Amino acid sequence: MKKVILLIALAVLSSGVRASEEKQAALTIKSIASDDRNMPVEVYYWYPTDAKATNYVFGNGKVFAANEANLNAPISLGKYPVVLLSHGGTRSSFFHTGWIASALAESGYIVIAPKPPSAVEITPDLAVDEIAHRVSDLALGFSHLDSIDMLRLSADKDKVSGVGFFLGGTSMLLLSGAKLSPSKYRASCDGDNTNVDCGWLAKNKVDITQTSDHKVNQSKSINGMKSVVVINPELTSVFDENTLKMITPAVTVIDLTARHHLALKPAKLISAIPRLKLIKINTATEFSAFAVCTDQGTKILAAEGEEVICQEIGHQSRPQNHQRIVTQVLAALTDSLE
């Protein structure tokens, strides 16, 4: 992603990086054993580097544009805030993470982004488990930060925030201490556009009305987070209101209002969060949070009747909407670290 002077300037306030020092995005990938998944989880750690050359491509570049990075490059000298990042719904491609992860790394953040199972690996009957697993993966990646020699001394663990899109946004609220209501989750496919996965679950004959309390509210939390920024989080009307009142980090909810699934509209319930700020980006749709479509990808998706995935509203481009989202994310992170 091309560097935007405004984004770098915003990051200066929180990371101590001088505006004249243009950083590149680097990453290192670690496979970490997960007791919750009973399998290893790949965690992608993005960070700023002074190295100019790139030697790694994140994404396959067929349908959506890939991001170039420098694998295992030395981290730029300095101390950097930490951002936990989770992008997408239950069946989203992990490669949509690249544009926002690289932008944050270039702006002076160490970014922790666990890779969830692919869409073909998550069967409908496991969808409810994935809610807790996404949170567990984030906590796992954070807990192993000190074991990574190249990052350990550069990570400012007193300045930890979270950024999440869709189910990833739900994860950030859970990580902040909120809990879902089991009874509300069991009723979330009763026809009021509460759960974005209802059609997929019904098609595969998964009855969530039988979901146990334990499966819904077993998620972990991280104490001391400074802020979370969530973009159209899922299941916002399913939260236990009393637990929302207990969230201590500053919470910024970004609503991409030009067009999105009704289940992605932030519920009035979230007004219970004490330090809440709501921002609307009226030029962006839910698909504006996806990676940029390639020319080939646009043709492929159009042939499948899914051309809306690549379309923006009016004369906007996806990179323009990415820039707007990143600007708001960086502003929220900066405010919480001052």
Image (tube, grey):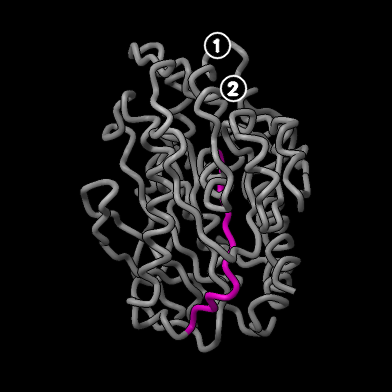
Kindly check if marks 2 and 1 are in contact, taking CB atoms under 8 A apart as contact: yes
Q: Residue furthest bottom?
A: 77
x and y, in percent, of residue 323 in the image: 67, 54
Cα distance, mark 2 to mark 1?
Answer: 8 Å
Specify whether residue 164 is painted magenta.
yes
x and y, in percent, of residue 262 in the image: 65, 22
Q: Residue furthest left?
A: 39
Name the side, left or right, on which 258 lies relative to 107: right
Q: Helix or strand or loop: what does disc 1 sit on?
A: loop
Q: Give, as a three-letter code, the residue at label 1.
A: Asp
Q: Which residue is mark 2?
A: 194
Q: Which mark is residue 190?
A: 1
Q: Give, as a three-letter code, the residue at label 2.
A: Thr
x and y, in percent, of residue 274 in the image: 76, 50
* The quadrant where residue 300 appears: top left
Question: Is residue 142 among what the camera can see?
Answer: yes
Task: Name the residue rendered at 61%, 40% in the picture.
Answer: 288
Name the side, left or right, on which 246 lies relative to 196: right
Question: Is residue 196 among what the camera can see?
Answer: no
Q: Helix or strand or loop: what does disc 2 sit on?
A: loop
Q: Is residue 59 above or below residue 288?
A: below
